[in-house]
Amino acid sequence: MDKDISGVLEGWEYDPRRVTARWIQGHDGRPKVQLRLDLGLFQMAAEGRPDGTTPHGFDSLLEFYRDLEESLPGSHPALTLNDEACNDLQQEAVQYYCRYIAFYAVGYLDGVIRDTQHNLDIMSLIERRAADAETAWQILQFYPSVRMMNARAAAEKAEADGDIRRGVSHLEEAVRDIQQFWATYGDEDAVESEPDEIVILGELLERLRGKLPVSPIQMLQSSLDRALREEDYEQAAVIRDRIRRLQEGGSLVDEGGEGSR
């Protein structure tokens, strides 16, 4: 059997400026995703663990430890993840990371959402069960990046589905989660300096908010701001009254039947 992969890579050049991936159909008839690297490629199963294994008979190492945790009564402290267990989970997370960046490159947003959530769940497990904080931090430090990618994919999927408000909600929640993460782990300066993850989410949030329909109150608020800039205080008073009536459940129609200007 010819084991040289040159033929597989022929015509598929590595581009260091972007993530390059593609779908293929495996010899088993199942879809797989390939991620192009400078020295070759990664080939990953599209479902289950990317390497296609079933650790301890489970779909993933995370599922194995979840099952073990759920079998313990209440908040039983017996399950403690030592360095080896945490390292094994971190290696699994690396596999899922490679696959979700490949999924994002080919536009498979459902896969990105699923795999980033898998890694977030690994982090949650390690945070609860790691033997010591230093070991836990080895993977928890990547939380902002994974949370950002999860929200980004969810927001872009919502946008594609025409549900802009849901997309905005995903992004706003992720920004709060990342800010809370840095506050919890004692680096509030990271929030004030706007880390890259928040900048990326903020740019997408601004774009999606720009697609939201403008409400009557927002239109009136813009008119009010203009009236105040122009020092037209009589008109400003009229607009304030209309805003107040809308907020109280009224309408823009004046008592005399004349609509707003």
Image (cartoon, rainbow, N blue to C red):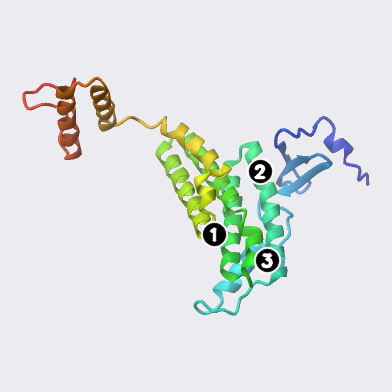
Q: Which residue is mark 2?
A: 101
Residue 122: which quarter of the image?
bottom right
Report x, y in % for residue 217: 25, 32
Label 3 vs label 1: CA separation? 19 Å
Residue under the image location 71 percent in, 38 percent down: 21
Quadrant the C terminus occupies: top left
Dot 3 alpha-carbon crowd within 10 angstroms: few under 14, some 14 to 19, many 20 or more = many
- Marks 1/2 in contact by CB < 8 Å: the verdict is no
Can I make out residue 161 in this image?
no
* Residue 185: mark: 1
Q: Which residue is mark 3?
A: 86
Q: Amino acid at mark 2?
A: Ile
Q: Amino acid at mark 3?
A: Cys
Label 1 vs label 2: CA separation? 26 Å
Residue 17: which quarter of the image?
top right
User: Considering depth in this image, is 6 or 93 the residue closer to the camera?
Assistant: 93
Element type at marker 2? helix
- 138 over 231 or under it: above or below: below
- 76 over 166 or under it: above or below: below
Farthest-out residue, left: 256
Q: Amino acid at mark 1?
A: Tyr
57 relative position to 181: left or right: right
Can I make out residue 133 in this image?
yes
Element type at marker 3? helix
Residue under the image location 66 percent in, 66 percent down: 135
Report x, y in % for residue 39: 84, 41
Element type at marker 1? loop
